[in-house]
Structure formats: C-alpha cells, structure tokens
Amino acid sequence: MSNVTYLPWVPSEGEPAAVPASAARETGVSFETVDEQHHPFAGADESRADEQGQGSQSVDEIYESLLRKLGMADMSAHEVRLWLRERDLDDNTVEELLGKVEHLGYVDDFRLAEQLTGRLVLRKGQGRSAIALELRKRNLTQSAIDEALANIDQADELNRAIDQALKRAPSVQRFDRSTAERRLHGFLSRRGYPSGVVREAIQAAFSEYPPAG
C-alpha cells in the first residue's frame, strides 16, 4: 500500500479544491501575494467580477468565489463574515459557509495572527504594541492576538530594539543628550516597543554613539 500524505487544505470528497494563501506559501505554490497592510477585499479583478453578478449568484457560486479569494489572500473570520454579508446572505448561511472554510483550514485566526506577527517583526522590526494594533485592524479574535504576542521572545525584542536604536543613533548624535534621548525614545515608541525595552536600547546606542552634550 502506498503512503498517503494528509494535507489540511485538501477537501473531503465532494468539496471543491482550493489552497489557502498561507498553505500556498508554505508549499511553494505560486499565488499573487498581498501585503499585510492591504485589506483582502480591495484591488482584485476577482472581487469586481464577483460583484458584477452578485445579485444572481447562488450560495454555491458565492462559496466558490470565497474559495478563490482565500487562495489569493488570507482573511480573518470577521473579514469572511463581512464579505459574505455583502452578498446578502442570511446569518445562518454566513455562519455555515464560514464554518465550512474554517473546518477545511482555509480560515484560522490563530495562524493568521502568528503569520502577520512574523512579517511585522522581520520586515519592519516592530514591537508588540504596534503589532497588536495591526492585528486588531484585521479584526482577529483577542485570544488569537494574545497568543501571537505571547510568542514574541522578550530577549529577541530587546535585541531588535537595540539594533533599531544603533541605526538611528548617528542621526541624533549632534544633539545634546536630552534632545537625542527624546528623539530616540519617540522613534522606538512609534515602533511599538515597551518603555523598559526603549530605555535599555537607548543606553546601548549611547554607549556606542554618545550625544554631543
């Protein structure tokens, strides 16, 4: 008997086949990527095509459109609800379709929160409060946000803050200490680092790039 590999996005018999955007990235399947700051409702020809025939679409056709959309960009459960309600579906049908895509692994707030957190950390060097704000903009559940933030390593966060401060410090080195500290503090705070981390990062930066006065 040959080995069978189970993939969470493979549907049960009778289900339409689709691959969620997150699964596509993990397996190397190529899909159009969407940056985390772009709302998944915006900008796609697919969305416009859906809207043109929206009034006459059956539930099955709407479900097929949803699967295609999830193949292009990950969506939170809240975003899926909004998208389905815009198609004039009743609440029971909305919850039924949402439950279906969640069961198949296409929608998972915890996975999405973890992925977005990783991107914001790696691409932008953001701290936890800025990350929390971005996750709330996607209307992720609070439990998913809390879990993603809890997984941020405190030592790694401090190292990232120090790295950011060291890169910024030369540009404020000409100022007196009070001004330089205020500018660095504002810079790091805007990136979402907590006050204790900000203080340590500034001290580390000033040890290498001391202010003028």
Image (cartoon, rainbow, N blue to C red):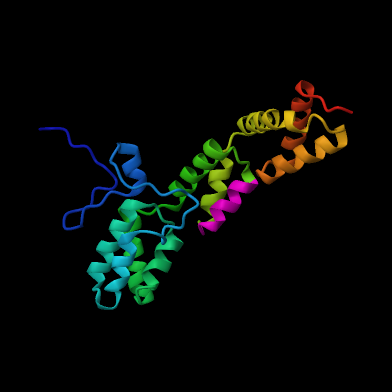
Main SS category, magenta section: helix
Q: Residue at x 74, y 37 (%)?
A: 198
Residue 100 visible in image: no
Q: Residue at x 44, y 62 (%)?
A: 79
Q: Residue at x 30, y 37 (%)?
A: 27
Q: Is 134 situated left or right of 175 in this image?
A: left
Q: Residue furthest left?
A: 1
Please say whether residue 107 is one of the residues in the magenta stretch: no
Q: Residue at x 83, y 28 (%)?
A: 211
Q: Which quadrant holds residue 203?
A: top right
Q: Nearer the viewer, residue 100 or 70?
A: 70
Q: Position of residue 101 (x, y in %)?
A: 32, 58
Give the magenta-colored segment's residue range.
129-139
Q: Is 134 situated left or right of 60 in this image?
A: right
Q: Is 133 situated left or right of 87 in this image?
A: right
Q: Is residue 21 above or below residue 138?
A: above
Q: Is residue 86 above or below residue 195?
A: below
Which quarter shows the N terminus? top left
Q: Position of residue 57 (x, y in %)?
A: 25, 74
Q: Is 173 situated left or right of 58 in this image?
A: right
